[in-house]
Amino acid sequence: MAIKEDVENATVGENEALSQPLMGKDRPDGGRGSDPENSRKGSKGMVYLSTFVAVCGSFAFGSCAGYSSPTQDAITKDLSLTLAEFSVFGSILTFGAMIGAITSGPIADFIGRKGTMRVSSAFCVAGWLAIYFAKGPLSLDIGRLATGYGMGAFSYVVPVFIAEFAPKELRGALTAANQLMICAGVSVAFIIGTVLSWRALALTGLIPCAILLFGLFLIPESPRWLAKTGRDKDFETALQKLRGKDADISEEAEEIKDYIETLERLPKAKFLDLFQRRYLRSVIIGVGLMVFQQFGGINGVCFYVSNIFESAGFSATAGTIIYAILQVVITGLNIAVIDRAGRKPLLLVAATGLVLGCLLTALSFYLKDHELALKSVPGLAVAGILLYIGSFSAGMGAVPWVVMSEIFPINIKGVAGSLATLVNWFGAWAISYTYNFLMSWSSYGTFIIYAAINALAIVFVVFVVPETKGRTLEQIQAAING
C-alpha cells in the first residue's frame, strides 16, 4: 500500500484494505479487527444539525445559480442593458466559481471547514448587496462575480465537511443532501422570481447565508481537520459532540489519529504530487466523474430547457415547472437509497438513463428537421428531457460529489478537491458556452454527442470507479491508493 510503504515499507492488498481500517503502527488494522461503529452508540442529533447548517450553503449555491433565469427581462429593462451586457452578467458567475474552486481547498486546509463556509457566505452576502443596489452593469457584474466565488467554494467545502463528520452508514445520504439543496435553491429562485422584483429576489439570497452564519456557532468543526492540525483536545470534544455524550468514541478517535499520523509523515502535498502513482487513481476517479458529470450536457439542458421545449413545440412554462419539480423529487429520493443501493449502481443507472434521454431528444429533433411524424415530436422531446433530468438527479448529480468527498486522503484533499471542483466548473462553462453553437450546427447532432459522452461514462464507472458505501474514509482511501 503506497502510503504505508513510505513509512513502514509494508504492502497490503486491496481486499485486506477493504475488510479492515487502515490503522495502527504495525499492521493495517493495528491488531484491531473490530468496527468502531459496533461499539459506538449515541445520539445523531448533532450530526443532523451540522448537516442542516452545512447544506444552507448548498441552498445559497442554488439561489445564485437560479437567479438570472427569472430576472433577465426585468434587469435588462430597468437598467437598459444590452443582450451582450446581460450575457456577461449571467456567465461571469461561472468564472467566479472557478476562482472559488481553485482557492477553496487550500483555504479549507488553512482555516478549517467552518471558516471556509464563513468566507463563502461573506462573498455571497457582499455579492447580493451589490446586485440589490446596482445602478448599472459594473455593480451587477461585481456582485455576480462575488456570488460566483461563494458558489465555487461552497461546491467543494460542503460535501467535504459533511463527509468528514458523518458516520459511515449515513455519509452517502447526508452528503447527497448537498445536491438536493442545490436543486431546491434553484427551483425556489425560479418560482418566487416570477412574483418578486429582481432586487427583492436578490435579498432572498441573504436568508440561507444568515442561517448558515448563525448555525456555525452551534456546531463543531470537522474532527478530521482538527486532528490533522494537531488540536487533539478540540478533536475529541468535536467527535464526542457529534456522536453523543454517552457514545464510546475511543476506537474511532484512535483510528482517525493513527491514520493522520501516518499521512503526516509524508511530505506536504503540492499540485504536482497529485500525479504521483500513490494518488493517481483517486485523482483520475475524482476528476473523471466531474468531467462526465458536466460534459454529458447538463448545463446546456438546464440553462436552455425552455428553448428546448419551445423548439419541440411544447409549452415552455409547463415543461420548466415539471422539470424543476421532478429534479427536486428524484434528488430527494436519491438521498434515501444512496447508502443502500451504493454509489456505483446509482451512477450506472443514471448514465444509462442519460444516454436514453439524449437519444430520445435527438430523435425528436431529427423528426422535426426532416418533417417526419411531427405529432410525436413534442412528446418525444418532453420524454427525453424529463428522462434526462430524472436520471441526472438519480445519480450523476449528487454521487460524483459524494465520491469526491470520500476518495482523497486528507493530506491531499485540499489540492485534489480544488482540482476536481475547478474541472467541474470549467466543464459547466464549456457546455453552457458551446451549447447554442452546437444547436445551430445540428440540434439532433448535439444530443447524439451528449449521448456518446454519457455512454463513455458507463465504461468509466464500470472499470474505474470503486464502490465506497459502508466503509470508513480511511478504508476507502487505503483501497484506492494501495
Image (spheres, grey):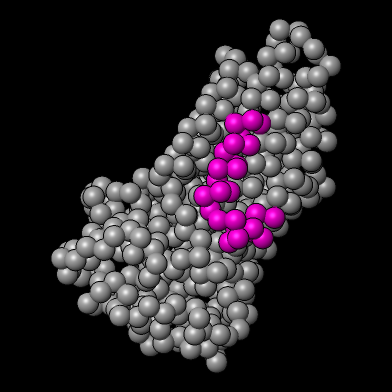
Can you say which quadrant of the picture contains the N terminus? bottom left
- 195 within the magenta span: no
The residue range painted magenta reads 333-357
Magenta part, dominant SS: helix
5 sits to left or right of 90: left
Nearest the viewer among 267 and 104 is 267
Residue 198 placed where, x, y %? 72, 46
Q: What residue do we see at 23% from left, 50% from top?
A: 276
412 sits to left or right of 244: left
Nearest the viewer among 63 and 464 is 464
Q: What residue do we see at 35% from left, 80% from top?
A: 32
Q: What residue do we see at 70% from left, 55% from top?
A: 333
Give above or below for 52 relative to 432: below
Give above or below for 47 relative to 43: above
Residue 312 placed where, x, y %? 76, 21
Give above or below for 198 relative to 438: below
